Image: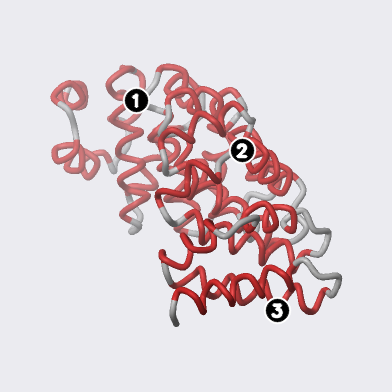
Amino acid sequence: MSAARLAETMNACLSQALSDSPELQQKALGTLASMTKVSPKIRDLLAKTDGAIPAIFNLSKSSCSIIQALTLSVLFNLSLNPDLKRSLADMETIDLLNSIILSPSSPESSKLASSLVCSLAMLDKNKAKFGVAGTVQLLVHAVAAVPCGPAAHHLLSSLAELVQFHGNCTLAVRSGAVPVLIQLVTNSNTEDLTGTSLTVLSLVARFGEGLNALRKIDGIVNSMVDVLKGTCMLSKEGAAEVLLRLFDESEGCVRDALMLPEFSNLLADLSVRGSGKARDKAVG
C-alpha cells in the first residue's frame, strides 16, 4: 500500500474513531491496532498524522472496556518505535496508565496498560518519570492485591524494568515489594511469575535497603535454595544472585546455608556464579 493510501486509510479510521457510533469506533480502532502492529513505518506515519495521538489518548479514557483496550493496543504498538518512547511518556499519559493499573475496566486493559509502562520504561530517561508519578508503588499494590491474577506477569515485568533505576528500587522496597515478591516465589506454581519476581528481587538486592529487607525475611536462604532445586533457569539465576548478595553481607546466611543438606549442590552453582568473597564465605 502506498504512503498516500496509508495516510488516507488512517485519516478515515481516525474520523470513524471519533464518531458517535461505538460499532464504527471499535472497527476503526481495530484497524489501526492491526496496522500499527506490523510496521514501524506505519507507526511513524500515524504518529505524524495531525491530531492522531491526542485523539487516541482521549479515547483511551473511554468507559467502554473494548474501546479502551483497543486504544491501549494502538499506543503500545506506537511505543515499540524507540524514537516515540520519549514523546509518548508525558505525565498525562503516565497518570492515565496509573489510573488504569489502579482501577482497570477489564483484565485486558490492565495487561495493556502495564505492558505500555514496560515498553516506555525501556527508555532509561523515562524510568525516573514513572518513579516520580508513583507507578512503582501502584505496581506493587496491584501485584499484592491479586498475586496470581491475569495481569500479574505484565505488572511484574513492568516492575522489573523500572527497578533497574536505583531510585525506583528504593521506592519498591519502601512500598513493601520484598515480602510481596517472596510470597509469590514461595506460593506460585507459575514459572514466569516466580522467575520475574526473582529478577526484581535480584535487582533490589544490589543496594543496601533492598538487601536488608531480604535479610529480614524468615527462611530466606531455605526459600532460595528450594528455587535452585527447580528447573526454571530464570528463577535459578535470580535465586543464585540473591544468595550471593546475602552471603557477601551476612555470615548468618552462610551458616544457614551450611546447615542444609542440599548445600553441596548450591556450592557447585556458586563456583560458577560466585565472587571470590562469596566463595570464601561459603567454604569458611
Give 47 or 182, whichever is nearer the viewer. 47
* Real-space CA distance between mark 1 and mark 2, rounded to the nearest whole angstrom: 23 Å
Quarter containing the N terminus: bottom left
Instruction: Indicate the position of residue 159 as horizontal and vertical percent values.
Output: 52, 41
Q: Give the side of residue 247 with respect to residue 52, left or right.
A: left
Q: For mark 2, what is the residue?
A: 140
Q: Is disc 3 placed on a helix, strand or loop?
A: helix
Q: Earlier in the sequence, mark 1 or mark 2?
A: 2
Numbered disc 2: secondary structure? helix
Q: Residue at x 14, y 41 (%)?
A: 272
Alpha-carbon span between mark 2 and mark 3:
35 Å
Residue projecting furthest to the right = 20
Q: Position of residue 206 (x, y in %)?
A: 36, 26
Q: Report the mark closest to the observer, 2 or 3.
A: 3
The residue shown at (58%, 34%) is: 136
**Furthest residue to the bottom?**
1
Local packing at callout 2 (Cα closer than 10 Å; few below 14, some 14-19, many 20+) is: many
Could you say which quadrant of the image residue 40 lies in? bottom left
Q: Tell me if residue 154 comes above or below residue 168 in the rendering.
A: below
In which quadrant will I find the C terminus?
top left
Residue furthest front in the image: 4
Q: Which residue is mark 3?
A: 27
Residue position for label 1? 246
Q: Secondary structure at mark 1?
A: helix
Query: Taking 252 as reference, is 157 left or right?
Result: right
Q: Which mark is residue 191?
A: none
